[in-house]
Amino acid sequence: MTQSQCRLALVPLVMCGVLVAALQPAARRQPQAPAADLLIANGRVYAGSGAFQQAVAIRGNQIVAVGRSADLERLRGPQTEVIDAHGRAVVAGFNDSHVHFIDGGLALQDLDLSGVTTLREVQARISAFAQRKRGATWVRGRGWLYAPFPGGLPVRQQLDEVVPDRPAIMECYDGHSVWVNSKALQLAGITKDTPDPKNGVVVKDPKTGEPTGVLKEAAQSLLDKVLPRPTDDDLRAALRAAVAEAHRLGVTSIQNANGNARDLQLYADAKRAGDLRVRMYAALSISPGFSDADADRFDELRSRYGTDDPVLRTGIVKIMSDGVIESRTAAMLAPYTNSTSSGTANYSVEELNRIIAQMDRRGWQIQVHAIGDRAVRMTLDAFERAAAANPAPSRGRRHRLEHIETIDAADIPRFGKLGLIASQQPMHVALGDMNSTTPSGPWPDNVGRDRASRAWNWKSILDGGGRVTFGSDWYVAPLDPLQGVWLVTTRRTPPGMRDQKLSMQQAIDGYTSWAAYASFEEQRKGTLAPGMLADVVVLSRDIFAQPPSTPTDVVVDATVFDGKVVYRR
């Protein structure tokens, strides 16, 4: 090679060296991403929409990265808190789509009769609780089932035997009936001459006409004048207790299914004090006779408390269209078995149509308690009429039916057609004696085999193009979403009923991304992705590889709310 050729050959090498030298200072000047505040690594991270990863990095109250553990190591700094998930499942914070949060907190202080299956045990628990609460003016409890009592309903004498000295009240698990003793009836002035209030029943002995001690639906309000009302301090303590219970169970968002102006003020005060450590979507309750003046007051509350705050917001109203099947107060298309009664709707067709059109026109999201197949049809019809009469709001409509315990087959595809959400509570299936291949009990016995075959038909609604979201109805059922996940993925059905089981991913979606959609919040929570709010749950094992075999064999190991670890097992 000549000298000239050597010089030509060196030119590319020199230019490469110059280019590398020029680039090195730029690389050194490029800022490194700030370290994460919290890193959850080595997990089975369900990011949502069927996608899995291994790690989640959090800075402040937002997720900044989701990916492989090795790749996210670059975000670990000297101050980064690290949770090693050791292969356990990591999911978005659970979002309970239907809960009575303050009532749940208050119920934590009362006797819990959930799951007790014999009258002897019911009475033994009440007796022991009354002994522990000797200083209480009332003995209070809740959660009794219908099955332990002959004929399906308790009587006051059974409660008198164990609490003879002061008034006692035991609320049914479904919240639609109470059982009281003779002292409570006397104090409230309830006698055989007391008439049934509108939408309520004072159950009376068919032979003597005397009240039996059971008050159904609106008849419970006859006790309001004598029952001690919780103070503001009681409510604040109940809210703190409810938040702690939610954290223990991985619940970081709740959609409260009833409320009023006092409740909103309580939540706002708790938020300012730093005590509202769950994301609250609070409904306002509508009653029969709801007027334009009432709607104006609701609009003012919506304006005051807002509709877009990530911690506290409103924008949804709740209507109770009927009762429950166990006490035969749900509105049915045909009579209950061995009866001429088909239940009673709380609203006429005309009034339900009027109120739903009124609130739809004002841009409110509407949720309607509809358990019986007639109540479901009335509500579907009302939503269809409102959509035809009113222009759609800018954010669209996401109206909801709550519970839908039974439904006529012709109405199942209407959820998809009308763009409605079926908000259902999986553990009600077990409480209603329907998680069985041979169901028997007040719920299936009251409706008969045909209607029972369409009990809690969430898969059929999904397959028909409708949307579904899951919740607990706490305090009616346990707040624990993992119990609901267990039921959804293992549900048993009698012969002739369509299988309603869902996959594990669908079950988790029902408590996370589907629930976020149900409250217009899918853009900021419900999945694990950069930019989403940092609400995350670490479970006790990989439920995608080892699904739960019992309601309680998977628990929460850690709960992260707003970027901070708020619970560790």
Image (cartoon, rainbow, N blue to C red):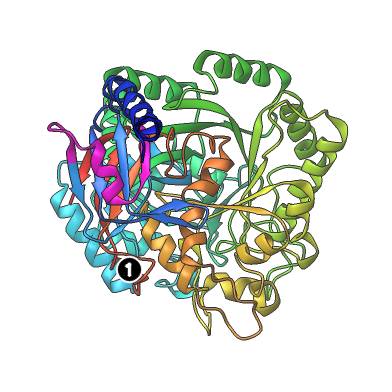
**Residue 188 to residue 173: above or below:** above
Residue 464 as seen in the image, left or right of residue 19:
right
Q: Which residue in the structure is indicated by mark 1?
A: 116
Residue 298 as seen in the image, left or right of residue 474:
right
Q: Residue at x 55, y 59 (%)?
A: 209
Q: Residue at x 32, y 17 (%)?
A: 272
Local packing at callout 1 (Cα closer than 10 Å; few below 14, some 14-19, many 20+) is: some
Residue that protrudes farthest toward the right in the picture: 389
Question: What percent of the width, then of the height, locates residue 35?
Answer: 24, 30
Residue closest to the eye, 128 or 477? 477
**Residue 402 to residue 519: above or below:** below
Amino acid type at image mark 1: Val
**In the rendered structure, which segment of residues is drawn in magenta?**
62-81
Q: Residue at x 61, y 32 (%)?
A: 317
Residue closest to the eye, 535 or 24? 24
Q: Is residue 236 magenta?
A: no
